[in-house]
Image: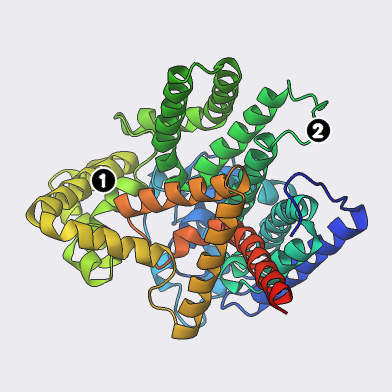
Amino acid sequence: MKKSNTIEHVSCAQTLLIFCVILVATFAWMVTGDESLTGPTGSMGDDVYFENIAYHLAKGEGIKFDFTDPEWQRPYREANLGHQNDWILHCKVKGLTTSRSPGFPLVAATVYRFFGRQFWLVRAVNLLLMTAAITLLLNLIFRFHGRITGTLALVTMSLDCFVLRTAGQFMTEALGTAIVCLVFAGCIWLSRPILDPNENRRRDWLGWFVVGLLFGFGALVRANLNAWLPLIVAAFIATILWQWWNQRALKGLLEYGVSFGVGVALIAAPYWVRNCLVTDAFAPFGTSGSFGLVGGYSDEAFAGFGNWSNQASVDSQRTTMKKPGFLDLPLPKQELWMGKDSINLAEKWMIENWKLLPSLMTMKAISHLGFYRQPLVLQCLNGAMLFGALIGCYLTRHNLGFWVLAFFAMSLVTTCLTWPHYGRYSLPLRPLIHVACAIGTVAFWTFLLTKKKSLG
């Protein structure tokens, strides 16, 4: 395995080859998916809501729902041969909303604005953005860990249908994967060991500002990234105190932290303020997390091995909708009421079942790691990949390994505190696991071959 203090040149041709391999693999997995690549979204629920927001954003109407718009309904009516879209065509939800993150709809709306309502083009943008971000990440692995490690990461990443297939969906996973890869690549680049003592790194504060911008947009794409922010702030404060206690310089660290924070706030703060204004309450991150919380803390969630229960969430919302005056409220207020009632039910369940919480958290962690409702072969492969990633993280613990563990720890903690959804929320992190696993696997086999040669 290459030493961490060497850099291998990666040519433009090699980068293009990496891009093409990921592009072809992603398209191949998209074709094998259940969703049409040219038609409207599926009828899962979230995808339809995202597409509805995108449609109205493109018309300049803001972040809102209006399922009654005849022109919006048209492609769903035409594709309703099996009556799977009946619920969409009869849905009466209308008004400003805080229940869905606007990042992905904003990207789709940009496509609609310039090229018309082309569903295939939105999927193509998904494909290109995710491919480009994964290519950048793999390019860094080729540079810092050599061709063998980089090629192994490229091969295993190309076989990951769970991640690559998301490019064909009107969901946040593909764009979220791209952003996580870019933020991660920025982190390992900016915190890399100084390989050249003459290298000028005085402008790294600008790099952390750009990483902050990316993470801020990521928080608008994937709502669960908002839950990472308190952990990031806590870790930053702890690092500052540790540096101060050990009488180490704080100037650079403070500059980088402030630059990152300003970048995040510049992108995400306007949306946070907007949510508080439209709900007339303190709800900066919106209401999707609040009115879904009962789905993560309920008898149904416990029976589903910690995974989010749609039934528990829907039951809570239906109960709230029966309250006097509820239907007279604007949509943001309705979402706020549903969120408060969901939180109350979740808190009540936690108090009454506090002895079950350790078991529930454990089940959530196992589900998040991808070990629930999967064939035994895939569970074994998943376990081997995680084991290889741990070796890779240990070997690169001062840079890449540290960031892999940091990203995954934040994801795992926030998922255990909220809810997993059959491993779906871990998909954007899987490219990080692939690169760490490749490093660990190459190191492991190099060790075995060296041992065999010395014994022979």
Vertical relation: 63 (above or below) 36: above
For label 1, the SS is helix
Q: Which residue is mark 2?
A: 196
Where is residue 348? Give x, y as percent: 11, 50
User: Looking at the rendering, which quadrant does residue 389 occupy?
Assistant: bottom right
Q: Is residue 58 visible?
A: yes
> Badge 2 local density, few (<14 within 10 Å), some, or many (20+)?
few
Q: Is residue 41 visible?
A: no
Where is residue 166? Give x, y as percent: 58, 65
Name which residue lies at 7% across and 55% down: 352
Where is residue 141? Give x, y as percent: 73, 54
Q: Say which of 94 and 160 sits in front.
A: 160
Amino acid type of the residue that numbered disc 1 sits on in the rendered structure = Gly
> Badge 1 local density, few (<14 within 10 Å), some, or many (20+)?
many
Task: Please tell me whether mark 2 or mark 1 is closer to you in this view.
Answer: 2
Side of 21 relative to 247 (left or right) = right
- Badge number at residue 42: none
Name which residue lies at 39% across and 47% down: 99
Vertical relation: 229 (above or below) 293: above
For label 2, the SS is loop
Side of 252 relative to 335 (left or right) = right
In whole angstroms, how far apart are the C-alphas of marks 2 and 1?
53 Å
- Badge number at residue 339: 1
Q: Quadrant of the C terminus?
A: bottom right
Where is residue 81? Give x, y as percent: 52, 82
Task: Identify the residue at the far front of this view.
Answer: 455
**Of callouts 2 and 1, the N-terminal one:** 2
Vertical relation: 385 (above or below) 433: below
Amino acid type of the residue that numbered disc 2 sits on in the rendered structure = Asp
Name which residue lies at 43% across and 19% down: 245
Vertical relation: 262 (above or below) 421: above
Q: Quadrant of the N terminus?
A: bottom right
